[in-house]
Every structure is written in structure tokens, then in C-alpha cells.
């Protein structure tokens, strides 16, 4: 009986009745500033997703997206394998060619590899994919999340004919990869009476959804690091399985808080693109610091334009309990302040978008973390020096007596 219940539970994770799908072409926007959005988003980003199933992976059906260029610091499309939640291709705003008869508009074809479709903009995905998503992203859109333009229209392309796209199929609650890596070991542990490695069903008294449970397990290993160091470090952990943007590169600093400690971090600031004219000459298109929790929800983001840079070229950021004293201390020291909003476990994400070719201090220069290798040799500063964030935990009373920025 128990095995039957578990089987029904697992199948409920992977199949959603079509009637429950979004009743519009694009799904409702995923706004990065909302704590309802998982996968450690940036608060200055907005995402729109469209997903579909390919019952016959031999067919060459695809989709056409037609829209206007939005007014935004950045926009892009990524195509994803929903079975792994990993990007398999992307196209960025600067690479999208305008329509021949209207320079304000573009047409993008999303088709399987081997498709005979031709066009100015074609984004291919592996033909063996059975579950596919396309995600449109805006960063720092002007005035509204839409960047003062309507959302692009989606049409289905089948056997050379074009028709209105059906409603998007929702994000799989759990991918096949998630089931293999997390759910099945959990079920096997229950059946064998083992509890080690089991999914934690609650956090801080909050009962978690199955998707939150999986996200919690995806990032759990990060908290094995930085436990005993006086200086906290950032690493290039694998972001596969979290619908990452191929144009973004991330360093993540896992922090386990002791009592009411504050966190002080610093990093040397890259030059960011303040206008379209500097997109190719700036070190990065965009950078930011985001405060996430151990379920991959984002609680706060400070973008490049919001971060004060000291005369020495460094960004200093104090994260502490939000009260008049800590804000006054940050102001007296002349450093940036972010309220501590998560619980005892924080994932601080430093994001570099589109480091320019030849720039050697971008996050993309830090190799992916390999848990079989020495952790100390994989810290961000080992590869990009002072451009990688480092941090220090500071006791509340020590913070109040601090008269100058301490060395990290």
C-alpha cells in the first residue's frame, strides 16, 4: 500500500492536467522581486515563460516570436530542457536582427536542430527534447516591466503553416533529473527505514511545497563551506537545474549566521554599461548583489547603479538587522546597507552579466566548483583576485563600536 501511495505521489509531481495550464500564451510574469519566485532571481529582472511538450521528437515543429525591442538595460531569450531545467541555447538583444521592413521589430524562430527553417534570427534546441520552455527576460525595464512595449506574440509553426500558439504548459513541478537525484533517494530511504539525507519537510515552521523541497536540496551542499573561516568566500557553484540565464555568471557566498551577527562584504567593482553606447566597451553589462535564502527565494537585490563605490574602487556592503543604529553605522562608515531579511542561512549571489571579451576579472573566469577538489583552491579570489566578493561576520556589539571599515 505504501509503495502505491508513493507511486501516485511521484506521478503527481510530473503530470499536470491541461485544464490547469495558464489560459494565455505567455504565462504570468515571474517578477524577481517577489518571494514567490524560486531559483534565486535578481529583483531587477522579470521573466515570461512559454512551455510545450513534444510527443513526437522526430517532428520539426517550432514557434515564431514577433515583437518590438523593449526599452530595457537588457533583454534576451533562453530555450530550456524542462527535464533538467537547464538552458540549451540563448540569444541576446544585441544579436537579434531587426525586421527588414521595420527596424523597431524582430522575428525569432525557435526550432529543433535539423529544421529547414531559415530566418534572420533562429534559436535551435536539441531535437530529442520532449519538454521545452522559452523564457524572455527583461532587466531594468523602463517605466513598466514591459519596457514600454507590448509582449511579443507567439505563433506555432507546423509543417510550414503558422497558427496561433496554444496556451503554455506549466513548469514541471519536479524535473526528471530532480526525481532521480532527490525524490527517489528520499523514497528509498523511507522504504528502508533510513532517515539520513531525507528531504526536510519544513523550514522555520513553514511547510514546504515539493518544488521548494527540491530547491532546498539543490543548494544544501553549499552550506558545507565557510563554516569555520574568519573570512567568507564566494564560489562558482553549478546553477544547472535552476533555469539559469546563459548571459549571467554567478558567485555564491553561503553564510550560516550566528546569533545576530552582521555580514560585511567587499569586492572591486567592474565598470558597467550605463547606456547602450557602452554595451561593448564596459567590463560587464550589469552586476548586482542579491540576498537569497536556502529555498532559493530572493529577498533583496542591489544593482550596480544602487551601489556606492569607494575611492579605492571597492564596493563595501553591510548586511545587518534593520534598525536605526545599524543604518546610522553604515552611513557613518560611508558604505552600502542591506537589511538582513532571511533566516540563519543566506545565499549571497554576486552576478556579472555579459563580461566583455578580453575582460579577465569577470565571474566567468572562475571555474565551476568541483566537490572532489580542495575547496580552498576554488574560492573566487583565487582566479579574479579582489574582484571576487569576500566577507566577514561581525558581532552586533563589535559593529556598534567600529570606527572604520575593517580589513577583510
Image: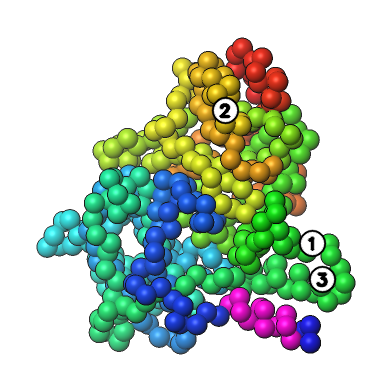
Residue to which mark 1 is pinned: 197
Which numbered disc, 3 or 1, marks the residue that appears first in the sequence?
A: 3
The residue at the point 48 percent across, 20 percent down is: 310
Q: Is residue 109 left or right of 203 when viewed as pictured?
A: left
Q: Position of residue 113 (x, y in %)?
A: 41, 75
Q: Is residue 404 visible?
A: yes
Q: Is residue 386 left or right of 286 when viewed as pictured?
A: right
Which numbered disc, 2 or 1, marks the residue that appears first in the sequence?
A: 1
Relative to 399, residue 236 above or below: below
Which numbered disc, 3 or 2, marks the residue that appears first in the sequence?
A: 3
- 213 or 227, which lies in front? 213
Q: Position of residue 184 (x, y in %)?
A: 73, 73
Q: Is residue 258 left or right of 136 when viewed as pictured?
A: right
Q: Which mark is residue 323?
A: 2
Residue to which mark 3 is pinned: 189
Secondary structure state at the residue bearing disc 2 = loop
- The residues bearing labels 3 and 2 have C-alpha atoms spaced at a distance of 45 Å
Residue numbers of the magenta segment: 4-14
Residue 89 sits in quarter: bottom left
Question: In front of the other: label 3 or label 2?
Answer: 2
Q: Position of residue 352 (x, y in %)?
A: 47, 42
Residue 214 sits in quarter: bottom right
Give neighbour class at mark 2: few <14, some 14-19, many 20+ (Cα, 10 Å).
few
- The residues bearing labels 2 and 1 have C-alpha atoms spaced at a distance of 38 Å
Q: Which mark is residue 343?
A: none
Quadrant where the image shows the N terminus: bottom right
Secondary structure state at the residue bearing disc 1 = loop
The residue at the point 27 percent across, 45 percent down is: 143
The residue at the point 50 percent across, 56 percent down is: 37
Amino acid at each position: 500500500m505504501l509503495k502505491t501511495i508513493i507511486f501516485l505521489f511521484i506521478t503527481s509531481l510530473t503530470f499536470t492536467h491541461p485544464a490547469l495550464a495558464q489560459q494565455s500564451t505567455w504565462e504570468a510574469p515571474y517578477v524577481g522581486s517577489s518571494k514567490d519566485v524560486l531559483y534565486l532571481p535578481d529583483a531587477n529582472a522579470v521573466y515570461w515563460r512559454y512551455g510545450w511538450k513534444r510527443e513526437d521528437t522526430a517532428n520539426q515543429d517550432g514557434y515564431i516570436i514577433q515583437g518590438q525591442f523593449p526599452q530595457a538595460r537588457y533583454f534576451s531569450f533562453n530555450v530550456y530542457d524542462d527535464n533538467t531545467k537547464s538552458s540549451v541555447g540563448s540569444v541576446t538583444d544585441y544579436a537579434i536582427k531587426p525586421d527588414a521592413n521595420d527596424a523597431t521589430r524582430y522575428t525569432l524562430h525557435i526550432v529543433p536542430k535539423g529544421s529547414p527553417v531559415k530566418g534572420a534570427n533562429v534559436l535551435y534546441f536539441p531535437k530529442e527534447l520532449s519538454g521545452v520552455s522559452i523564457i524572455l527576460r527583461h532587466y531594468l525595464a523602463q517605466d513598466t516591466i514591459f519596457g514600454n512595449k507590448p509582449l511579443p506574440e507567439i505563433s506555432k509553426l507546423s509543417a510550414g503553416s503558422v497558427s496561433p500558439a496554444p496556451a503554455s504548459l506549466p513548469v514541471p513541478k519536479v524535473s526528471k533529473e530532480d526525481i532521480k537525484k532527490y525524490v527517489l533517494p528520499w523514497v528509498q530511504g523511507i522504504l528502508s527505514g533510513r532517515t539520513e539525507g531525507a528531504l526536510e519537510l519544513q523550514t522555520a515552521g513553514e511547510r514546504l511545497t515539493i518544488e521548494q523541497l527540491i530547491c532546498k536540496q539543490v543548494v544544501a551542499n553549499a552550506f558545507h563551506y565557510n563554516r569555520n573561516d574568519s573570512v567568507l568566500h564566494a564560489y562558482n557553484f553549478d546553477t544547472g537545474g535552476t533555469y539559469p540565464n546563459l548571459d549571467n555568471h554567478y558567485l555564491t557566498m553561503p553564510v550560516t549566521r550566528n546569533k545576530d551577527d552582521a555580514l560585511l562584504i567587499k569586492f572591486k567593482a567592474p565598470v558597467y554599461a550605463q547606456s547602450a553606447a557602452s554595451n561593448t566597451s564596459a567590463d560587464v553589462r550589469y552586476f548586482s548583489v542579491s540576498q537569497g535564502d536556502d529555498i532559493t527565494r530572493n529577498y533583496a537585490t542591489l544593482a550596480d547603479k544602487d551601489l556606492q563605490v569607494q575611492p579605492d574602487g571597492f564596493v563595501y556592503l553591510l548586511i545587518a538587522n534593520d534598525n536605526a543604529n545599524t543604518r546610522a553605522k553604515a552611513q557613518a562608515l560611508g558604505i552600502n546597507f542591506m537589511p538582513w531579511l532571511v533566516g540563519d542561512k543566506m545565499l549571497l549571489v554576486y552576478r556579472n552579466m555579459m563580461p566583455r571579451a578580453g575582460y579577465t576579472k569577470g565571474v566567468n573566469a572562475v571555474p565551476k566548483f568541483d566537490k572532489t577538489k580542495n575547496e580552498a583552491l576554488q574560492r573566487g579570489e583565487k582566479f579574479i583576485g579582489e574582484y571576487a566578493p569576500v566577507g566577514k561576520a561581525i558581532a552586533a556589539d563589535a559593529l556598534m563600536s567600529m570606527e572604520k571599515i575593517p580589513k577583510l
